Structures are given as C-alpha cells and as structure tokens.
Amino acid sequence: MKENESVSESHIAQWRADFPILRTSTQSGKPLVYLDSAATSQKPQAVLDALTQFYASENANVHRGIYGLSELATDAYESSRRTIAEFIGSCYPDQLVLTHGATEAINMVAASYVATVCKPGDEILLTVMEHHANIVPWQMLAEEKELIIRYVPLDESGALDLEAYAKLLSDKTCMVAFTHVSNVLGTINPVKTMTEMAHAVGAKVLIDGAQACPQIAVDVSLIDCDFYVASAHKCYAPSGVGLLYGRPDLLEMMRPYQTGGSMIETVEFERSTFLPPPMRFEAGTPAIAETIAWAAAFRYLQSLDLDAVRLHKLNLQRLLHDRLQGFPKLKIHGHAEKKVPVVSFTHEVIHPHDLATILDSEGVAVRAGHHCAMPLHRYLDVPATTRASLSFYNDATDIDALVKGLEIAEELFA
Amino acid sequence: MTNLQALYQQVILDHGRNPRHFSQPEHAQIDQVCFNPLCGDKIHVYCDYAVDRKTFQALSFTGDGCAISVASASLMMVALQKKDSAYFYEAFDYLKRLLAGEAVDLSTIDAFSAPEDIANMRRIQVIAGVKNFPMRVKCATCAWHTMAAVVEGGSEPIKTE
C-alpha cells in the first residue's frame, strides 16, 4: 500500500468489531470514544477468549506438576514465551525474561546489572522525554552508587537533539536508557543510530519499548540494543505482564532480582544455586493466563493486514494533527517527522482537566495531566497537557467526536 | 441544566478566569502549598494573622490549576477575608455537606448571619456541582485543604490525590 492511499472501510469496521468495549457507552450515555491507548490499550475478543479458555480448561501451575494438566499449562506458557520472543525479533526465547511489566524490567536491569558493573562517577544518560519508569530507578541507583545522570535535550520539533546526544556520550557513560517512542510527544526515536553511537563509547543500551511495541514493528536484533523492555497491557493484552529482552552474555552475568520458587536450581539450608536466564529472573508463580493471552494478542495482530494497519494509523495521525490545527488557541507539543498517533496539546484558555471533563461528557476518553513525565512537562514549561492517543481500532469518527468536544469546551469557556 | 452546565456555571468561569485575592505578598507569615502529584496542579495560600492570632489579617493565593480549583480557591478567599479559623471550619464543613449531596439550609448555620456571609455561601453552593464528577472533587477542595493546613499551623507541603 502506498502513502495517501486510504484503507477500506470494511477493514476498519472489522478491526473495531474485534474490540467488544468499543460497542459500549460511557456514563454520559454517549458511545465510548477511546483515545487513551497510550495509557492502556483495549483488548480484542481473541485475548478475552484466551484468558477464559485457559482458566476453563488448562489451568494449573507451571514448571511444577508431573500430571498432564500442569504439563499442558507449562507448554502453553513456554510456547507463549516463544511467540512473544518472535514478536520483538528476538529469536531465542531464553533471551526473554517475563516480568510484571516494563517498569519492573527497568528496575531489574538497574539493580541486577548496572549496580554490579558501574563505578562511582560513571554516567547514566537518559533523555528529557522519558517516562518516570525510565528515570526514577536510575535516580535511586545513582544515589546509591554515586553515579551522575545526564539528559539528552530535544530540538524544536520534539525530536531528540542528536548532536547534543553525541556530545553527552563519553567513556564515562556506562548506561544509556531511552524510550523508543515518546508517550507524550509521539516521537519515534532513531534507536538503531543511538544504539550504535552509545556502543561506540562502550556504553550499554536499554530501550523502553512500552509505547513502541503496540504501534510499530520492533526487531531487537536489528536495533542491536543490550536490553529492551515492554508491557503487555499496552499491546492489546492483559495487565500484569511485561518483558525484558537481554543480550545473553549480560543476562548470564546478572544476579537474581527477586528470589524464591521457580528460579532456583538447588536450595540447601546454607545456600542456594540459581537457574540460568530467563528462569533466574522469574521467582514465584508467574502471570500464566495473562502471558498466554499476550501471545494470543500477538497472533491476533499477525492475522491482520499489517500494511493496512500501518497506513490507517498514519492517516489517523495526519488527520488528528490537521483537525487540531483548526483550533488557533490550541498548541500541539511534538511535531517530529516520525511519530505515532499520539498528540499532546495545551489550550490558551482551558485547563487540561476541564477539557478532559468536558470531553468525557461527550464520551471521549483522553488523558489530562503530566502522563508520568513531569520532567518533560517542566522542560516544555507547561504544568499539564491533554493527550489523545490513538490505535488502529480508532477511526475518523473518533476524531470528529474529539473535535466536537473541543468546540463545546470553547463555547462553554468563551 | 446538564451536569456539565451545573459545574461550569458563570460564577466558576468568572472566578476561574479572574480569581480574586490572587497575589503573592512580599512577606507572609504563612505560605502553605498544596500540590496534586497526579495532575501537577499547585496552589499557594498566603496568610497573615492579626495580633489576636485568630483573625486572618491578610489572605491571598497563587497557583496553577483548572477552572474548578482556581474558582474554588477564589470563592474561599472572598468568603474568608477578615474572618477567623472557627469561621473557616464552619465554611469548610458547609462545603463538605454540599459535596456529600446534602441540601443545606443556610439559615440554620449561626456563623452565616450577615447578608454578606449568606451571599458568599450562596456562591460557594456552585462549587457543589462537582459532586457529579467524583474525579474532580479533589480540584474543588485543594485550596480548602491548604487553608486547613494554614489554620492548623502546618508548614509541610500537603498533597491531594
């Protein structure tokens, strides 16, 4: 499919039909217009079915029982790991640690890898567009280990300033951690180039893929990063599961993050030995059904016409920008050349919270606030923004509803 | 009138846009800040007591916030000028009863006897429109909790979530 080509209405109608929640109404009695997919995605019927099927006919604990049902559950869980690994282009399932979310995965790398290799005075390089989850774990580590945190600034468009990035990198940089896609600006970062630049000075690279995985194709082997993290709930799957992809030699040298059942080889009264990765990092009973449902979400996505999905999202992003630019009092933050359909904006007169309440009365769900990126909002010099974040299950009528809500708000505050 | 119209009445829009007693004094005996970490809103309440240590001699506020939080702070400022802590508690209690959905008869509250008090409290009734928007109640009460901390003599920043 070529740019500017439109996606057939029947395609879009089918995608929408796959998500039961889109047929519901809000408390205001209006049909739900869900524009908060960057906070969490909605779940297709295939995912709901996978959860039900597991609990109805396959439920048992994994890696434990000798009986058939446990074997069935273990097979389903481990084959889900393989599916998830394939989805991010990581060919080997043993490079894929299943965590409780992207946040836990970042904390794991900070505590179990960086804490063991860094020296006082070493630098951690982040960017000003990071989510709190990719700032606070490093601040805690920096305090404990006397490290220095530096931040890559943005250019005017809301893209990272790569010249500044190049200058900030040095032989003192031990870790570079940045988001693949900004949850506020929608910017897609040049992760491959940034990884190469970091590796050139000997730094390791962690990429926060929480916003990228649901929006763009990800291949960790192409990016060649050292660590990559993501959360299932943003990828059309249940909450409570995430992933950490790690380079095998780095995972191998990492100490356990949490300890307990499932992650040990032997336990004696005096000491214990641990399993190799990824099991070393998966203490306790995992989120079994949720992981299996995550694999079902990936299979569902693979069943779609992915070219059509990509084009539809590009069209939505352009339409959203065009329509919002029709409001002279509205300022969009983030005009990077490469971005996903996530738009944050401020209004000259109307505070984001008032706007979100008024939009809610029209059935339109947007997020208002700092979107877990307070430093970025301070950098942009705004206390809060309103964010509309779209997915392939949105369509032009959703953008119409947003525009109508904005008109009502302007009228009320005129 | 829809819930939305009941919330965004002219009084709220007016006080939200043109808040009264919105200024930062050079020196204030008390500068109490309220911060909402969920939304990033911040309100400072500045207070000087009269020599009796009870009457609010000078009372003003500054801050960033939505129309509801700024208007509620402004209406509170208007109501509390030259009043004292006992009067503040009466007014806060009145607001809480309104927010709980109670139809409060102003003539039953002794503290609000002067015509000016009654007029101020009638305007405060408008804030109660927020009761149909549970997520926004914290916006409406932010300044009031800040004022409670002022009266209680606290200096630590308070938070609403």
Image (cartoon, grey):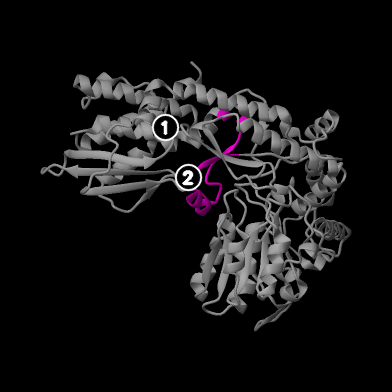
Identified at 16% across, 41% down, the residue is: B54
Nearest to viewer (mark 2 / mark 1): 2
Image spot of residue A296 (x, y percent): 82, 48
Identified at 66% across, 82% down, the residue is: A271
Q: CA–CA distance between discs 2 and 1?
A: 18 Å
State left or right for residue A317 relative to residue A312: left
Q: Amino acid at mark 1?
A: Ile
Give me the disc on residue B68.
1
Query: Please, is residue A56 above or below residue A246 in the view?
Result: above
Q: Amino acid at mark 2?
A: Val
Question: Is A368 inside the magenta-drawn segment?
Answer: yes
The chain to which mark 1 is attached is: B
Question: Which stretch is magenta?
Answer: A359-387
State left or right for residue B117 relative to residue B93: left
User: Which residue in the protein does label 2 denote?
Assistant: A382
As helix, strand or loop, the secondary structure at mark 1 comes to helix
Q: Residue B129's quadrant in the figure? A: top left
Image spot of residue A371 (x, y percent): 56, 47
